[in-house]
Image: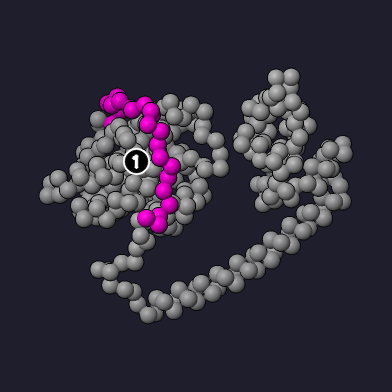
Amino acid sequence: MRAGEAAAAAGVTIKALRYYEDCGLLSPGRAANGYRDYTVEDVRLAEEIRSLGALGLTPKETGPFLACLRAGHHAGDHCAESLTAYQQKIEALDLLVARLTHSRQQLISRRDAAARRGFPSATQPSKEPDEMLPKADPLPSDLPAPVDDGAAAHLPGRTLPALPFTGTDSSDIRLDTVSDGRWVLFLYPLTGDPAADIPEGWNEIPGARGCSQEACSFRDNLDALRAAGVDRVLALSSDRADYQQALVHRLHLPYPMLSDPRLTLADDLKLPTFEANGQRLYRRLTLVLRGATIEHVFYPVFPPDTHADEVAQWCRNHRDA
Protein backbone atom coordinates (compact mmCIF):
# COMPACT_ATOMS: atom_id res chain seq x y z
CA MET A 1 0.00 0.00 0.00
CA ARG A 2 1.08 3.61 -0.57
CA ALA A 3 2.38 5.86 2.22
CA GLY A 4 -0.90 7.73 2.67
CA GLU A 5 -2.88 4.51 3.09
CA ALA A 6 -0.32 3.04 5.50
CA ALA A 7 -0.21 6.23 7.60
CA ALA A 8 -4.01 6.36 7.84
CA ALA A 9 -4.21 2.67 8.78
CA ALA A 10 -1.55 3.07 11.49
CA GLY A 11 -2.96 6.34 12.84
CA VAL A 12 0.24 8.31 12.16
CA THR A 13 1.37 10.95 9.67
CA ILE A 14 3.34 10.34 6.50
CA LYS A 15 6.13 12.37 8.08
CA ALA A 16 6.17 9.92 11.02
CA LEU A 17 6.48 6.95 8.65
CA ARG A 18 9.48 8.61 7.00
CA TYR A 19 11.05 9.22 10.41
CA TYR A 20 10.53 5.58 11.46
CA GLU A 21 12.23 4.52 8.25
CA ASP A 22 15.15 6.91 8.90
CA CYS A 23 15.53 5.31 12.35
CA GLY A 24 15.77 1.87 10.71
CA LEU A 25 12.50 0.71 12.28
CA LEU A 26 10.60 0.24 9.00
CA SER A 27 11.92 -1.07 5.69
CA PRO A 28 9.15 -0.77 3.11
CA GLY A 29 9.69 -2.31 -0.30
CA ARG A 30 9.55 -0.46 -3.59
CA ALA A 31 6.88 -0.82 -6.25
CA ALA A 32 7.78 -0.95 -9.93
CA ASN A 33 7.19 2.80 -10.23
CA GLY A 34 9.69 3.48 -7.44
CA TYR A 35 7.13 4.41 -4.75
CA ARG A 36 7.38 2.90 -1.29
CA ASP A 37 5.17 -0.16 -0.87
CA TYR A 38 4.08 -0.73 2.74
CA THR A 39 2.85 -4.11 3.95
CA VAL A 40 0.36 -5.07 6.65
CA GLU A 41 3.35 -5.85 8.88
CA ASP A 42 4.73 -2.35 8.35
CA VAL A 43 1.38 -0.93 9.47
CA ARG A 44 1.38 -3.17 12.55
CA LEU A 45 4.91 -2.04 13.43
CA ALA A 46 3.98 1.63 12.98
CA GLU A 47 0.95 1.12 15.24
CA GLU A 48 3.22 -0.39 17.90
CA ILE A 49 5.64 2.55 17.70
CA ARG A 50 2.71 4.99 18.02
CA SER A 51 1.12 3.19 20.99
CA LEU A 52 4.43 2.93 22.83
CA GLY A 53 5.16 6.57 22.02
CA ALA A 54 1.97 7.51 23.85
CA LEU A 55 3.53 5.90 26.94
CA GLY A 56 6.72 7.92 26.60
CA LEU A 57 8.98 5.53 24.70
CA THR A 58 10.99 7.08 21.90
CA PRO A 59 10.85 5.36 18.50
CA LYS A 60 14.37 4.02 19.02
CA GLU A 61 13.33 2.49 22.37
CA THR A 62 10.66 0.40 20.65
CA GLY A 63 13.21 -1.91 18.99
CA PRO A 64 12.64 -4.96 21.27
CA PHE A 65 8.88 -4.75 20.81
CA LEU A 66 9.19 -4.57 17.03
CA ALA A 67 11.59 -7.53 17.02
CA CYS A 68 9.05 -9.47 19.05
CA LEU A 69 6.33 -8.77 16.48
CA ARG A 70 8.63 -9.65 13.61
CA ALA A 71 9.32 -12.99 15.33
CA GLY A 72 5.64 -13.82 14.90
CA HIS A 73 4.26 -13.08 18.35
CA HIS A 74 0.77 -11.59 18.59
CA ALA A 75 1.89 -8.85 21.02
CA GLY A 76 5.04 -6.75 21.07
CA ASP A 77 5.64 -7.38 24.78
CA HIS A 78 5.41 -11.21 24.54
CA CYS A 79 9.22 -11.46 24.71
CA ALA A 80 11.60 -11.21 27.65
CA GLU A 81 13.51 -8.39 25.94
CA SER A 82 10.36 -6.29 25.88
CA LEU A 83 9.86 -6.74 29.62
CA THR A 84 13.45 -5.59 30.13
CA ALA A 85 12.72 -2.52 27.99
CA TYR A 86 9.64 -1.79 30.13
CA GLN A 87 11.70 -1.99 33.32
CA GLN A 88 14.46 0.23 31.93
CA LYS A 89 11.92 2.87 30.98
CA ILE A 90 10.24 2.70 34.39
CA GLU A 91 13.59 3.16 36.12
CA ALA A 92 14.43 6.11 33.86
CA LEU A 93 11.08 7.69 34.66
CA ASP A 94 11.57 7.13 38.38
CA LEU A 95 14.91 8.96 38.14
CA LEU A 96 13.31 11.77 36.12
CA VAL A 97 10.47 12.13 38.64
CA ALA A 98 12.99 12.35 41.48
CA ARG A 99 15.00 15.01 39.64
CA LEU A 100 11.89 16.99 38.73
CA THR A 101 10.62 16.82 42.30
CA HIS A 102 13.95 18.15 43.54
CA SER A 103 13.95 20.93 40.93
CA ARG A 104 10.37 21.82 41.82
CA GLN A 105 11.23 22.22 45.48
CA GLN A 106 14.19 24.45 44.60
CA LEU A 107 12.01 26.59 42.33
CA ILE A 108 9.39 26.97 45.05
CA SER A 109 12.06 28.07 47.51
CA ARG A 110 13.52 30.59 45.07
CA ARG A 111 10.08 31.90 44.11
CA ASP A 112 9.12 32.44 47.74
CA ALA A 113 12.44 34.15 48.46
CA ALA A 114 12.01 36.43 45.43
CA ALA A 115 8.44 37.26 46.43
CA ARG A 116 9.60 38.31 49.87
CA ARG A 117 12.06 40.74 48.26
CA GLY A 118 9.24 42.47 46.37
CA PHE A 119 8.84 43.31 42.68
CA PRO A 120 10.40 45.91 40.34
CA SER A 121 8.49 49.05 39.47
CA ALA A 122 5.69 48.56 36.97
CA THR A 123 7.16 51.42 34.97
CA GLN A 124 10.27 49.35 34.28
CA PRO A 125 8.99 45.90 33.25
CA SER A 126 11.38 43.17 32.25
CA LYS A 127 10.79 42.39 28.59
CA GLU A 128 12.42 40.08 26.11
CA PRO A 129 13.69 42.02 23.08
CA ASP A 130 11.37 41.60 20.09
CA GLU A 131 14.22 40.42 17.90
CA MET A 132 14.80 37.46 20.27
CA LEU A 133 11.19 36.27 20.27
CA PRO A 134 10.44 33.16 18.19
CA LYS A 135 8.69 33.90 14.91
CA ALA A 136 6.07 31.87 13.07
CA ASP A 137 6.77 30.91 9.46
CA PRO A 138 5.71 33.50 6.86
CA LEU A 139 2.31 32.94 5.32
CA PRO A 140 2.04 31.89 1.66
CA SER A 141 1.31 34.85 -0.57
CA ASP A 142 -1.51 33.11 -2.45
CA LEU A 143 -3.84 32.29 0.45
CA PRO A 144 -7.52 32.82 -0.48
CA ALA A 145 -9.18 35.69 1.39
CA PRO A 146 -12.44 34.93 3.24
CA VAL A 147 -15.59 36.90 2.43
CA ASP A 148 -18.10 38.31 4.88
CA ASP A 149 -21.04 35.89 4.86
CA GLY A 150 -22.94 37.85 7.53
CA ALA A 151 -22.48 35.09 10.11
CA ALA A 152 -21.25 37.57 12.76
CA ALA A 153 -23.61 40.47 12.05
CA HIS A 154 -25.81 39.60 15.05
CA LEU A 155 -23.00 39.81 17.62
CA PRO A 156 -22.54 43.56 18.45
CA GLY A 157 -24.47 44.34 21.61
CA ARG A 158 -24.68 40.71 22.73
CA THR A 159 -23.52 39.74 26.22
CA LEU A 160 -21.01 36.99 26.81
CA PRO A 161 -22.32 33.96 28.71
CA ALA A 162 -20.99 33.00 32.14
CA LEU A 163 -18.85 30.20 30.71
CA PRO A 164 -15.87 29.14 32.87
CA PHE A 165 -12.49 28.18 31.41
CA THR A 166 -9.02 27.47 32.77
CA GLY A 167 -6.35 29.55 31.02
CA THR A 168 -2.94 28.32 30.00
CA ASP A 169 -1.62 30.39 32.93
CA SER A 170 -3.73 28.14 35.25
CA SER A 171 -6.08 31.04 36.08
CA ASP A 172 -9.83 30.46 36.35
CA ILE A 173 -11.55 32.68 33.79
CA ARG A 174 -15.28 33.32 33.46
CA LEU A 175 -16.01 35.17 30.25
CA ASP A 176 -18.58 37.56 31.70
CA THR A 177 -16.19 38.73 34.46
CA VAL A 178 -12.87 39.12 32.59
CA SER A 179 -12.77 42.93 32.89
CA ASP A 180 -15.02 45.88 33.57
CA GLY A 181 -13.15 47.84 30.89
CA ARG A 182 -12.27 47.15 27.26
CA TRP A 183 -10.66 43.83 26.39
CA VAL A 184 -10.12 41.61 23.37
CA LEU A 185 -11.01 37.98 22.70
CA PHE A 186 -9.73 36.49 19.45
CA LEU A 187 -10.96 33.13 18.22
CA TYR A 188 -9.06 30.92 15.81
CA PRO A 189 -9.54 27.44 14.30
CA LEU A 190 -6.40 25.57 15.33
CA THR A 191 -2.64 25.95 15.41
CA GLY A 192 -0.38 23.76 13.33
CA ASP A 193 2.01 21.27 14.88
CA PRO A 194 5.51 21.99 13.48
CA ALA A 195 6.26 18.24 13.66
CA ALA A 196 3.15 17.22 11.70
CA ASP A 197 1.84 17.69 8.20
CA ILE A 198 -0.52 20.58 7.46
CA PRO A 199 -4.06 19.14 7.19
CA GLU A 200 -4.87 18.27 3.61
CA GLY A 201 -6.47 21.21 1.81
CA TRP A 202 -5.90 23.58 4.75
CA ASN A 203 -4.34 26.33 2.64
CA GLU A 204 -7.32 26.26 0.27
CA ILE A 205 -9.87 27.01 3.04
CA PRO A 206 -10.34 30.82 3.11
CA GLY A 207 -9.20 32.21 6.45
CA ALA A 208 -7.99 28.90 7.91
CA ARG A 209 -4.22 29.31 7.70
CA GLY A 210 -2.34 31.72 9.95
CA CYS A 211 -3.17 30.89 13.57
CA SER A 212 0.41 30.89 14.87
CA GLN A 213 1.07 34.09 12.94
CA GLU A 214 -2.00 35.73 14.48
CA ALA A 215 -0.94 34.62 17.97
CA CYS A 216 2.49 36.21 17.44
CA SER A 217 0.83 39.35 16.08
CA PHE A 218 -1.11 39.85 19.31
CA ARG A 219 2.04 39.08 21.31
CA ASP A 220 4.08 41.68 19.42
CA ASN A 221 1.33 44.32 19.60
CA LEU A 222 0.37 43.80 23.23
CA ASP A 223 1.97 47.07 24.37
CA ALA A 224 0.20 48.98 21.59
CA LEU A 225 -3.12 47.44 22.59
CA ARG A 226 -2.60 48.35 26.23
CA ALA A 227 -1.69 51.90 25.23
CA ALA A 228 -4.96 52.01 23.29
CA GLY A 229 -6.93 51.18 26.44
CA VAL A 230 -7.19 47.38 26.20
CA ASP A 231 -7.10 45.78 29.66
CA ARG A 232 -6.66 42.16 28.60
CA VAL A 233 -6.18 39.93 25.58
CA LEU A 234 -7.42 36.33 25.53
CA ALA A 235 -7.42 33.70 22.79
CA LEU A 236 -9.89 30.82 22.40
CA SER A 237 -10.11 27.82 20.12
CA SER A 238 -11.08 24.16 20.11
CA ASP A 239 -7.40 23.15 20.48
CA ARG A 240 -6.64 20.79 23.35
CA ALA A 241 -5.42 22.56 26.49
CA ASP A 242 -2.12 20.66 26.54
CA TYR A 243 -1.33 21.70 22.97
CA GLN A 244 -2.21 25.32 23.74
CA GLN A 245 0.16 25.17 26.70
CA ALA A 246 2.94 23.92 24.43
CA LEU A 247 2.14 26.72 21.97
CA VAL A 248 2.38 29.38 24.71
CA HIS A 249 5.84 28.11 25.66
CA ARG A 250 7.01 27.71 22.06
CA LEU A 251 5.97 31.20 20.95
CA HIS A 252 6.44 32.96 24.34
CA LEU A 253 2.84 34.18 24.37
CA PRO A 254 2.18 36.63 27.25
CA TYR A 255 -1.59 36.18 27.35
CA PRO A 256 -3.79 33.19 28.32
CA MET A 257 -5.32 30.83 25.78
CA LEU A 258 -8.61 29.07 26.45
CA SER A 259 -9.56 25.60 25.23
CA ASP A 260 -13.16 25.05 24.10
CA PRO A 261 -13.12 21.60 22.42
CA ARG A 262 -16.92 21.30 22.50
CA LEU A 263 -17.37 24.79 20.99
CA THR A 264 -19.68 25.80 23.83
CA LEU A 265 -19.19 29.51 23.17
CA ALA A 266 -20.00 29.01 19.49
CA ASP A 267 -23.24 27.26 20.35
CA ASP A 268 -24.27 29.91 22.89
CA LEU A 269 -23.58 32.94 20.66
CA LYS A 270 -24.19 31.25 17.29
CA LEU A 271 -20.63 31.99 16.19
CA PRO A 272 -19.48 31.06 12.69
CA THR A 273 -17.76 27.66 12.40
CA PHE A 274 -16.67 25.33 9.62
CA GLU A 275 -15.92 21.65 9.06
CA ALA A 276 -12.47 20.35 8.09
CA ASN A 277 -11.08 16.82 8.24
CA GLY A 278 -14.01 15.64 10.32
CA GLN A 279 -13.69 18.44 12.89
CA ARG A 280 -15.92 21.39 13.62
CA LEU A 281 -13.73 24.46 14.10
CA TYR A 282 -14.10 28.15 14.90
CA ARG A 283 -13.87 30.59 12.04
CA ARG A 284 -11.32 33.30 12.72
CA LEU A 285 -13.06 36.16 14.53
CA THR A 286 -12.10 38.88 17.04
CA LEU A 287 -14.39 40.45 19.63
CA VAL A 288 -13.71 43.83 21.24
CA LEU A 289 -15.64 43.93 24.50
CA ARG A 290 -16.61 46.45 27.13
CA GLY A 291 -17.14 44.36 30.23
CA ALA A 292 -19.25 41.42 29.08
CA THR A 293 -20.83 43.29 26.15
CA ILE A 294 -19.58 42.86 22.60
CA GLU A 295 -18.63 46.31 21.38
CA HIS A 296 -17.17 45.51 17.96
CA VAL A 297 -16.56 42.43 15.81
CA PHE A 298 -13.75 41.84 13.31
CA TYR A 299 -15.03 39.28 10.80
CA PRO A 300 -13.71 37.97 8.59
CA VAL A 301 -10.11 38.38 9.72
CA PHE A 302 -7.52 38.66 6.94
CA PRO A 303 -4.59 38.70 6.83
CA PRO A 304 -4.12 37.21 10.31
CA ASP A 305 -0.44 38.09 10.70
CA THR A 306 -1.16 41.85 10.84
CA HIS A 307 -4.58 41.67 12.46
CA ALA A 308 -3.52 42.78 15.96
CA ASP A 309 -2.30 46.09 14.55
CA GLU A 310 -5.74 46.55 12.97
CA VAL A 311 -7.40 45.92 16.35
CA ALA A 312 -5.05 48.36 18.10
CA GLN A 313 -5.82 51.04 15.50
CA TRP A 314 -9.58 50.60 15.98
CA CYS A 315 -9.18 50.86 19.76
CA ARG A 316 -7.14 54.04 19.43
CA ASN A 317 -9.78 55.57 17.17
CA HIS A 318 -12.59 54.62 19.56
CA ARG A 319 -10.85 55.10 22.88
CA ASP A 320 -13.43 57.56 24.21
CA ALA A 321 -16.41 55.64 22.89
Does residue 287 show up magenta in the picture?
A: no
> Along the horizontal axis of the image, is 273 left or right of 41?
left
Is 125 displayed left or right of 59 in the figure? left
Which is more toward the observer, 132 or 194? 132
Start and end of the magenta stretch? 131-152
Q: Main secondary structure of the magenta part?
A: loop
Q: Position of residue 81 (x, y in %)?
A: 85, 51
Image point (43%, 42%), residue name? 137
- Relative height, residue 305 to residue 105 (above, below): above
Q: Residue at x 55, y 69 (%)?
A: 104
> Residue at 41% of width from left, 77% of height from top?
114
Q: Residue furthest top?
A: 32
Quadrant of the rendered image containing residue 26: top right
Coordinates of residue 169 in the picture (x, y in percent): 42, 57
- Amino acid tagged 1: Asp
24 sits to left or right of 198: right
Q: Residue at x 48, y 26 (%)?
A: 201
**Is residue 149 positioned above or below 92 on the image?**
above
The location of residue 287, given as percent across then percent down, is: 28, 41
Query: Dot 1, how many residues are within 10 Å of its Cα: few (below 14), some (14-19), or many (20+)?
Result: many
Report the colour scheme: one colour
- The relative height of residue 178 versus residue 69 in the rendered view (above or below) is below
User: Within the image, what quadrant is residue 157 found in?
Assistant: top left
**In the image, is 71 to the left or to the right of 142?**
right
Which residue is under mark 1? 305
Report whether residue 253 is seen: yes
Q: Quadrant of the N terminus?
A: top right
